[in-house]
Image: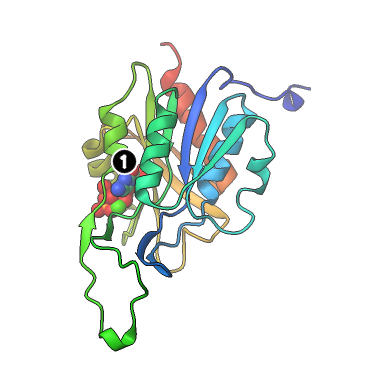
Amino acid sequence: SPGLVPRVDLADLRVAVSTGGTREPIDPVRYLGNRSSGRQGAALALDAAGRGAEVTLVAAHVDDGVLTEASTHPRVQIVRVSTAAELEAAMTDAAATADVVAMVAAVADYRVAAVSHTKLRKEDGVPRLELTTNPDILAGLVAARRPGQTIVGFAAETADSDAELADRGRRKAQRKGVDLLVVNRVGWESGFESPDNRVLILDAAGDAVGEASGTKRAVATAVWDAVAALRAPH
Ligand code: CTP
Ligand code: CA
């Protein structure tokens, strides 16, 4: 039956996906981090590989077990990183040969300007952490875009309503220069550790071209459907 035939509509595509949260060191034992679990990026990598793509999954810090399935998939290569600077180097490298790039990672916008090489101690008083801006990795990838390369960004936004979410998404899509921006709503209770997700898929102009909810794998399928539709000859 047709339902049992695997779809290989991404065969011959090279895909680079980033996932997880970066950690920016404060001192040898502390860091600035975020709540990203890495699940959505891992689901994207697995779905693409299942559809025939060759995938490089650049994984920053992820929850336990999130990379287990990807690590045994013959078409997924995992590159582990920690900081935004390491993620930038690995994604720049992977993007140089990729047909599709998806920046799912939660990249720290700031890092500590002067990392202490000894542990900060209470006796030294309350530390005043000076921060400096990390490079916008996605912006760099967009600037270096290869001919025919499709670039997908992700944005987790807090918003009081679906209308505010769509509005924030539209403005970010237009600002980022990506081909697709996948927007989801996050809050104290939703978005990160959860196995489920609900997203809006926007095109470069910020118009909705897809919507998905359910498991992160179902969301991944919708994202690759949107990528395939965008890349289809018309
Ligand atoms: N991103 C990136 N490098 C950064 C920050 C973000 O590549 N230093 C990428 C993320 O991986 C994501 C996209 O940019 O694909 C949007 O991230 P987001 O945090 O929503 O956008 P920012 O431009 O950082 O805006 P803000 O955090 O102020 O909403
Ligand atoms: Ca940000």
Q: Is residue 40 above or below residue 222?
A: below
Count of numbered labels shown in the rendering? 1
Query: What residue does disc 1 label?
Result: 137
- Report which quarter residue 26 is drawn in: bottom left
- Does the beta carbon of the residue at mark 1 sit less than 8 Å from ligand 1? yes
In front here: 100 or 217?
A: 100
Q: Is residue 82 above or below residue 14?
A: below
Look at the image and tell me in which quarter the N terminus lies.
top right
Q: In this view, does 217 lie to the left or right of 182?
A: right
In front here: 209 or 192?
A: 192
- Report which quarter residue 65 is drawn in: bottom right
Horizontal and vertical percent for residue 75? 63, 29
In front here: 80 or 7?
A: 80
Q: In this view, does 108 lie to the left or right of 50?
A: left
- Report which quarter residue 95 is drawn in: top left
In the image as oriented, which residue stretches furthest toward the right?
1
Q: In this view, does 143 lie to the left or right of 203?
A: left
Horizontal and vertical percent for residue 116? 31, 67
Residue 204 shows in the view = no
Tag 1: amino acid? Ile
Question: What residue appears at the point 52 percent right and 47 percent down from the top-left corner?
Answer: 40
Question: What residue appears at the point 40 percent right and 62 percent down from the top-left corner?
Answer: 33
> Dot 1 lies on which element?
helix
